Image (cartoon, rainbow, N blue to C red):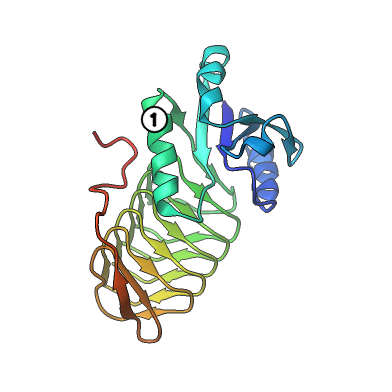
């Protein structure tokens, strides 16, 4: 399977690429897609940067087995919008998951990126186009929604629902049986002890609402109509 990664930025990805290619000899990372025009024609981690979305049609024409995974984590809306654009171009998606991660009794969609050191407990569920950074924990029977991201060492306790498009910052903690609404942002180091409404930006210990973002996308699913 030939895989193309979206976003040529984080050097840590090189370790995950090497581990997954060693684990699965049928998987080959062919290179990167990046909308930064200055990167087109360069190399990143020893792989070519083909260009932005404008080059996808050519990739699909010469490589009908192509699969794509987004590495974008700075903005959940950007992650969602770019992956939606890929889906509309007819792209298919794979997962880039470090082989040390145990996904027994875990439901996982496609287009997900899970780094080394992630823990996903039994009964958990991960949607499409989500990402978990090193040290992040998704505990038993919790759900990570489509196009969401857990930053390094973020801890999601048991039976928590993380809505689509949500960003959970570094070292943030969500206590058990809470719901984080879609497109919310949880600041680094926060401790969430109450449900968080959609579009809310929360921070602190205990986490409090700083502001609320309007005009939220209806869904973070990259395959939604």
Residue at (35, 54) in percent of width and height: 165
Question: Looking at the rendering, in which quadrant would you find the N terminus?
Answer: top right
Q: Report the quarter where the C terminus lies.
A: top left
Q: Residue furthest bottom?
A: 205
Residue located at (37% from left, 36% from top):
84
Regarding mark 1 in the picture, which secondary structure is present there? helix
Of 28 and 77, the residue lying toward us: 77
In the image, residue 222 sits, relative to residue 208, either above or below, namely above
* Residue 186 x/y as whole percent: 39, 70
Q: Give the labeled residue for mark 1.
A: 87
Q: Quadrant of residue 18?
A: top right
Q: In this view, which residue lies farthest toward the front? A: 37
Mark 1: give few (<14), some (14-19) or many (20+) Cα within 10 Å: some
**Residue appearing at x 35%, y 57% in the figure:** 124
**Left or right: where does residue 58 sit relative to residue 181?**
right
Residue drawn at the location 26% of the way across and 47% of the way down: 219
The image quarter containing residue 92 is: top left
Residue 7 percent across, percent down from the top left: 58, 43
Residue 119 in view of the camera: yes
Q: Pick out the residue farthest to the right.
A: 46
Residue 110 visible to the viewer? no
Q: Where does residue 179 sit, x and y in percent of width and height?
A: 25, 68
Q: How many marks?
A: 1
């Amino acid at each position: 399977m030939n895989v193309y990664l979206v976003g040529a930025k984080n050097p840590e990805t090189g370790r995950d690429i090497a581990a997954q290619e060693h684990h699965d000899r049928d998987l080959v990372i062919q290179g990167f897609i990046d909308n930064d025009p200055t990167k087109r024609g360069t190399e990143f981690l020893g792989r070519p940067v083909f260009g932005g979305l404008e080059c996808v049609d050519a990739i699909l024409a010469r490589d009908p087995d192509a699969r794509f995974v987004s590495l974008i984590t700075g903005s959940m809306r950007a992650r969602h919008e770019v992956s939606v654009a890929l889906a509309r171009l007819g792209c298919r998606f794979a997962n880039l998951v470090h082989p040390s991660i145990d996904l027994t009794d875990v439901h996982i969609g496609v287009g997900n990126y899970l780094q080394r050191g992630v823990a996903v407990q039994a009964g958990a569920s991960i949607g499409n186009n989500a990402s978990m950074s090193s040290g992040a924990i998704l505990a038993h029977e919790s759900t990570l929604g489509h196009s969401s991201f857990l930053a390094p060492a973020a801890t999601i306790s048991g039976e928590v629902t993380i809505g689509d498009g949500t960003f959970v910052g570094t070292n943030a903690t969500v206590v058990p049986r809470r719901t984080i609404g879609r497109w919310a942002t949880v600041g680094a180091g926060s401790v969430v002890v109450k449900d968080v409404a959609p579009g809310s930006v929360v921070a602190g210990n205990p986490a409090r609402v700083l502001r609320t973002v309007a005009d939220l996308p209806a869904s973070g699913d990259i395959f939604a109509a």
